[in-house]
Amino acid sequence: NWPLGFEPEEEDRNGESFWLDDSATTELTSLSSLRELTHALEKVGLEVVEMLARGVGFENPFKVMVLSESETTSGGETPSGGGFYPYVVGLQYQIRRQKKYLLPGSGSDWVTVLPEVESVLVTVGDIGQVWSNGKLKKVRGRAVPCLEELGNDKKRSNLGSKRNISMTLLLTLPLESTIAPLVSEKEEEDDEKRSGGSMKFRSIEMEDYAWRVYHEPFLFKDPLDRYRF
């Protein structure tokens, strides 16, 4: 089941994602190692978000994880965004040597990243940008796996159809989350004293917003624009 009513976009199905439900009962033990790995990555991810939250000054709200599996082929083509569940922090475990990732840079440029073996590549996404008008293409900070550039054309032609499977742990907001601006207590008191005007910033329920951007795309300005910085 695709969480929050989101489904992969029909026009661009070059990325497949699934929900890892740890509470589901099963007699199969083939996923035990996968669950153990995702639990370890989830712990790292929550610690990363905790550090970021302390730096900004708010409580860590992230309790939900999504495991995303993507498939790419070699051939030197520029990677595309693909359908991806909105996330805030993504983690990719580096299991093999010389496995490169591409990160979106400024404009249309891509930056190559080569993590060390047994390290975790952490990327920070922009959940507001991802959910803009229900489009999941604009994923800021998403790392896209790519195959190594081969030394000669013969090897490249022989391995041109080789496929690469990559799985990423994503930390996202829980359903009960509320999006609201960060204001000081003094600013809140000043707002309470004002009268005759409407509030510029209003709280948004995440569950309602997530459903609306998918089923009822906004015709004009996305209400989350004012919360971006």
Image: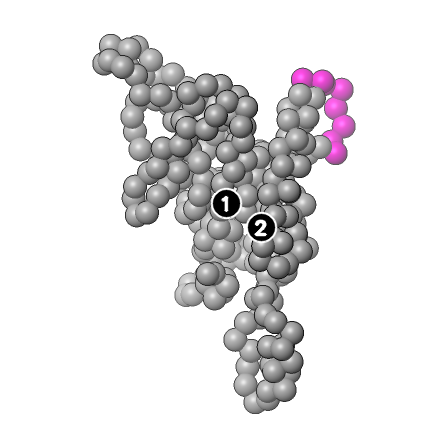
Q: Secondary structure at mark 1?
A: strand
Residue 47 shows which numbered tag? none
Q: Amino acid at mark 2?
A: Leu
Residue receiving disc 2: 52
> Residue at the bottom extreme?
196
x, y percent for residue 2: 58, 40
Residue at 62% in and 59% down: 57
Q: How many marks?
A: 2
Dot 1: within a 10 Å radius of its alpha carbon, few (fewer than 14), some, or many (20 or more) residues?
A: some
- Residue 80 visible in this rendered orientation of the protein: no
In the image, is residue 127 above or below residue 228? above
Task: Report the Cα–Cα distance between label 1 and label 2.
Answer: 10 Å
> Mark 1 and 2 residues: CB-CB less than 8 Å, in contact?
yes
Left or right for 215, reference 107: right
Q: Residue, x 66% and y 21% (percent of image)? A: 33
* Residue 15 x %, y %: 45, 33
